Amino acid sequence: MIVAKLDHALYEIAHMSRAEIQERWAKLTGRPVPRLSVAMLRLALGYEIQARAKGGLSRATRLQLDDSGDARPRAIPLAPGLRLVREWQGKVHVVTVDGAGAIHWNGQRWKSLSEVARAITGTRWSGPAFFGLKQRRTAA
């Protein structure tokens, strides 16, 4: 029953207008609506609904994300099944990592996230930075 309700809620999001998504976001989270494209708002709202239905991130993942206050950039390992989503110039790009750890985007296999970032932007980017896997943390 819960799965059917979750599926229905996610289906509804795909057909909502920007105003409807913003209204649902504010009602669900009680937070200001992020300044994102409609496509990214749909993804964010979908995540929030799924997190509430299924319990959100595990404790270990939350700890990893909140870990230490060092100033070095850190990258999240590319685990099999990982799916990265990035909006660039109004288009949503999805990169997946297969069971062997290979990176896939746009129907092709790529050697690195940096290659994918270059193909998307036309400039030299750090792939982990482009996809938000690196964060500069300030010392506490």
Image: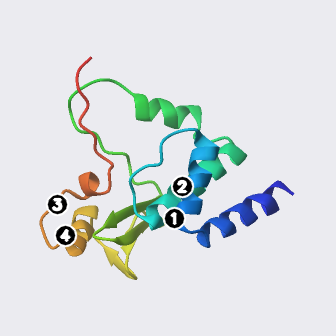
* Amino acid on which disc 3 is placed: Trp
Q: Earlier in the sequence, mark 4 or mark 3?
A: 4
* Amino acid on which disc 2 is placed: Gln
Quarter of the image where one finds residue 2: bottom right
Distance, label 2 to label 1, CA atoms, is 6 Å
Percent x, y of residue 138: 23, 26
Percent x, y of residue 85: 41, 62
Way the structure is coloured: rainbow
Distance, label 4 to label 3, CA atoms, is 6 Å
The residue labelled by disc 3 is 125
The circle drawn on residue 7 is none
Circle 4/circle 3 CB separation < 8 Å: yes
* Amino acid on which disc 4 is placed: Arg
For the point 56% across and 69% down, the residue is 17
Per the image, label 3 sits on a secondary structure element best described as loop
Q: Earlier in the sequence, mark 1 or mark 4?
A: 1
Q: Earlier in the sequence, mark 4 or mark 2?
A: 2
Residue 3 left/right relative to 102: right
| The N terminus: image quadrant | bottom right
* Amino acid on which disc 1 is placed: Arg
For the point 36% across and 62% down, the residue is 86
Position of residue 106 relative to residue 95, above or below, is below
- Residue 81 appears in the picture as rendered: no
The circle drawn on residue 18 is 1
The residue labelled by disc 2 is 22
Residue nearest the viewer, comparing 83 with 88: 88
Q: Residues within 10 Å of mark 2 (few under 14, many from 20)?
A: some
Distance, label 4 to label 2, CA atoms, is 32 Å
Residue 110 left/right relative to 46: left
Distance, label 2 to label 3, CA atoms, is 32 Å
Q: Earlier in the sequence, mark 2 or mark 3?
A: 2
